[in-house]
Image: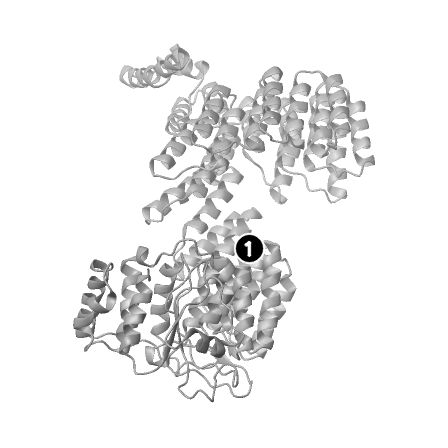
Amino acid sequence: MDSPTTKILKWALGRSESKFVLLSLSDNQNAKISRPSQSHARERLGEFQFLDAIPIIYRFKPNPRRNPITRCGRVNHIHWSVMKRGTLSAFGSFIQLSSLRSFRDTPNARGLGFSTIADIRPFPDYSPKKPSVRDSELVHQITNVIKLRRAEPLRRSLKPYECKFKTDHLIWVLMKIQSDYSSFWERPKLNASDSFVQFFDLLVYTYKDWGSDPHVFDVFFQVLVEFGMLREARKVFDKMLSYGLVLSVDSCNLYLDRLSKGCKKTAATAIRVFREFSRVGVCWDVTSYNIVLHCICQLGRIIEAHHLLLLMELKGYTPDVISYSTLINGYCRFGELEKCLKLTEEMRHKGLKPNSYTYGSIILLLCRTCKLAEAEEAFREMIVQGVLPDTVVYTSLIDGFCKRGDIRSASRFFYEMQSLDITPDVLTYTAVISGFCQIGDMVEASKLFHEMRCRGLEPDSVAFTELIHGYCKAGQMKDAFSVHNHMVQARCSPNVVTYTALIDGLCKEGDLESANDLLHEMWKIGLQPNIFTYNSIVNGLCKSGNIEEVVKLVGDFEAAGFKPDTVTYTTLMDAYCKAGEMEKAQEVLKEMLGRGLQPSVVTFNVLMNGFCLHGMLEDGEKLLDWMLAKGIAPNATTYNSLVKQYCIRNNLKAATAIYKDMCSREAGPDGKTYENLIRGHCKARNMKEAWFLFQEMNGKGISVSSSAYSALIRGFFKRKKFVEAREVFEQMKREGLAADKEILDFFSDTKYKGRRPDTIADPVDEIIENYLVDEELREAN
């Protein structure tokens, strides 16, 4: 039984005055030819062979002495009556887009190009016209008749419309059926992957009287590309070259773009295709160069990409915003900030306005290099220039501030983007959740996680793992395993990082047995523990004081193929330092250097902390001077060990000198630095200096811990400054931090009785309601 498409074409054939050959090939039979005879048609078809194909129409010239295939080899025209299974939905949109452009008016650079092969003539313009109102009504009527009476012979069904039917109506009817009735076209058991070449052969000849569109070649090629059949698309391109036809640059760009979105191997293929296609007549445009620029940057060949940008200009192409933004993004990946800014200025000089992608790349680089002030300045400039930030830009800023520990600024950007109707995505929520987990505020982190799920955003393994890691750091292992169970129920598979976070949390809690069970569970489900997993176990053993077992374990997993890294040796050094065995710690450092491992700043921080813990401050000072002399930049933790010990010894002059040295260097003071100095000054009753440090801390957006608040309140009480003490206490409450019992006693003690009763009762009642009751509830839970 003929397919509906074949019926339409047969019916149209019956009205034509020309001679047609209709080939209707099923999946497992040879060509059936109707009018003229099979033998006559086979003589004309010559070398063409057909395996699995779809109904197609061929037109042969009436003069039998001039066989267009066997003698001239001349391509008259092609029309595609039906696509392979599964690609018709794409065909409709492509053919509609293609029909909007006039083929004759399209320049060779963007239209269908032709090679210089002799006797090849260009295809005329047969793009389907836009139907009039009367034509649309007729097409609608014919389409409905075909759908409702598909079991009847088509000629009988459409007999009333025969006198009105024109050549353009056929294409409109086919397109109407394709868009409204996709199942109408389905052909079972059609292997398009095996038959696409034969199908292309079927497209070689057709009647121009059918209103054929030469852009059908582009459509066929584009559909193959859209469905990922890149090898087949390349074979079609090569076969078209043998007929002297070159695809449009739009189709070639689509092919390049699909190659560029794959791995590095396909990106390299895209660059090779770019060179090969230009040799056979494809006239590339700026879009083509932009795709290749992206591929070269993806391969890390940023200098070569910059040379290509200059080559574009030499060849007469004008680079656009995308060209510059792609190159800027490539330089940002390599941390070349100066070149990025220089290219941005070059853009402005040429009258090009940076877009959100340009600004986003620069802001991301600034955030990764901890230059958050410059990142925020670029963000504000972006808004002033009228460029609207998107989710990616806000996520970069939020992630940068969270990693620095400035959760207040991160939250400000998070709520600002929502006020501008910019919807946060999973990455945005993950960044904010990670920030709150970093400062130990698991209540807010859990709240945001729940909010994300309520918005219909499904957390990925990274989001789950961040929350699990936060609970593990906070010592809330029960909640961590609860999130782990929800992760499994959500069919989000825990990975090695997830299990490592849980093992690390158990080891820190001293539950080495459960950590070992979890390690075996990893092996059971096919996850390979990595060096980070083993380092967590080493850390747990070190915290338990079992250093001998640690040394044995390091030897075991080294024998199993896991070489200890800098973290392994640093953890072992830390255990020796805390045990007071500084000589063994230094021996571990020597062994580490002997294996060619580069010590990190954390390694030196461990030694510094060991020296300070055991009163060896002079050795600590020498270590700091040695680090600076060798060009090893100390961080805030390095300085904090010295600051803390000097504050404990009431040597505030030395502590202040270190603080000033920190401010003059890239490693500025952090929350711990301020907390140690505030405690030291409060202990010495230098409340003016302590209050100045407290205000500076707030000004920088650094979160103040409850211990710093408590030190200030104690200091003010010792100096009988009750008003200032209460002001700090009120701010502490606004920040949602709970005071300890000693601080609460200060406000309910007899020291407060000298004040008016109405000023005493209110805070005391509030203290009981907000803190003591909450504490009882927490204990009950």
Q: Residue at 64% across / 38% down in the picture?
A: 635
Mark 1 surroundings within 10 Å by alpha-carbon count, few (fewer than 14), some (14 through 19), many (20 or more): some
Q: What scheme was used to colour the molecule?
A: one colour
207 over 727 or under it: above or below: below
* Rendering quarter of residue 655: top right
Identity of the amino acid at label 1? Gly
Left or right: where 374 falls relative to 426 = right
Q: The C terminus is located in which quarter?
A: top left
Res. 343 visible in picture: no
- Give x and y (percent) for residue 642: 67, 29
Q: Residue at x 62, y 45 (%)?
A: 666
Residue under the image location 45 percent in, 32 percent down: 491
Taking depth in this image into account, of 317 and 1 the one nearest to the observer is: 1
Eyeballing the image, is 221 above or below 162? above
Residue 68 makes an appearance in the image: yes
Depth check: give the residue in front, 164 or 495: 164
Q: Which residue is mark 1?
A: 262
In the image, residue 563 lies at what x, y percent? 75, 33
Q: Is residue 153 above or below residue 603?
A: below
The residue shown at (42%, 15%) is 746
Total tally of numbered discs in the picture: 1
Q: Give residue 270's position: percent from left, percent from top.
A: 58, 64
The local secondary structure at tag 1 comes to loop
Q: Nearer the viewer, residue 494 or 128?
A: 128
Q: Nearer the viewer, residue 570 or 135?
A: 135
Residue 290 placed where, x, y %?
52, 67
Q: Is residue 557 above or below residue 44?
A: above
Split into 4 quadrants, where in the image is the N terminus?
A: bottom left
